[in-house]
Image (cartoon, rainbow, N blue to C red):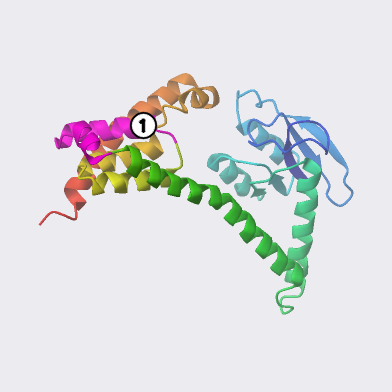
Amino acid sequence: MKIAVSSEGEGLGCRVANRLGLAPYLIIIDPETMEHKAVENPGHAGHGGMQAVALAIGENVEAVLTGYCSPAAEAYLKKNDISVITGVEGTVQDAVDEYVRKHRACKRTSEHPDSGYTREVVLEAAMRTARQFGKMLPILIGVIFLMGLFKAFVSKQMLLSVFSGNPIWDTVKGASLGSILPGNPINSYIIGGEMLENDVSLFAVTAFMMTWVSVGLVQLPAEMVALGRKFSLARNAISLVASIGAAIMTVLLLNPFRG
């Protein structure tokens, strides 16, 4: 059995690369013997993320461990009977050790299906829950602070001076605001709810929330580096126009306040 781990370097002590397609190396490892080799990824400079997928398939690995894998790449790997494990952090050695531990636990469970929940399984579930809560905690704290800041610094008069009540212009303004502001998608619900409470048009709020998650002008430079200038500009422009049209149609068709 062989597995592939996206890596920033050539050794087991190197960090796991965050993106499979842009990883400088794939380390091919036999987790039983720990024999390994580092294979350079020709696509790591941004010239083709699928080259890492081709490398993994060519090495006949059974699993790929990485921080992030695009949906297209993941689908292609799974089509070739290669499992994909994302969210992997730490060193390559740590990633392999964790994979071996979980693989053995799953093997024991499959061999003894009536053995019930072992201490190791329960402990792993508890640790996973704790990690998930730890990841969510900053978001929850941010939401609480955001609500307080919005109520403290954004008045109803200020919002009404920006959003005049004209459906078309309010939709355009809401879409523009959502395109500029960065942040977690959850924050758009908080801000959108506060806008509605302050009598801002549902057209504006809907457009604001749609562009918040589909258009990212602040992240545009990074997107152009990763995906190319023309594609990034076209995607953001199309998303902006489509969000405005979708917001208007959504409100007209589904507005709960209509008789």
Residue 2, visible in the rendered structure = no
Q: Residue, x 72% and y 79% (percent of image)?
A: 114
- The residue identified by callout 1 is 179
Q: Is residue 143 left or right of residue 60?
A: left
Residue 36, visible in the rendered structure = yes
Residue 127: percent from the left, percent from the top?
Answer: 68, 60
**Residue type, label 1:** Ser
Q: Give above or below for 179 relative to 149.
A: above
Q: Give above or below for 116 relative to 196.
A: below
**Foreground residue, 198 or 251?**
198
Residue 155: percent from the left, percent from the top?
Answer: 26, 39
Q: Is residue 251 left or right of residue 122?
A: left
Q: Main secondary structure of the magenta part?
A: helix
Within-10-Å neighbours for mark 1: few <14, some 14–19, many 20+ = many
Q: Is residue 209 left or right of residue 34?
A: left
Q: Which residues are magenta?
A: 155-182
Please check the rendered image and state whether residue 225 is part of the magenta-colored stretch, yes or no.
no
Asked which quadrant contains residue 75, the reply is: top right
Q: Residue, x 23% and y 41% (percent of image)?
A: 156
Residue 144: percent from the left, percent from the top?
Answer: 44, 49
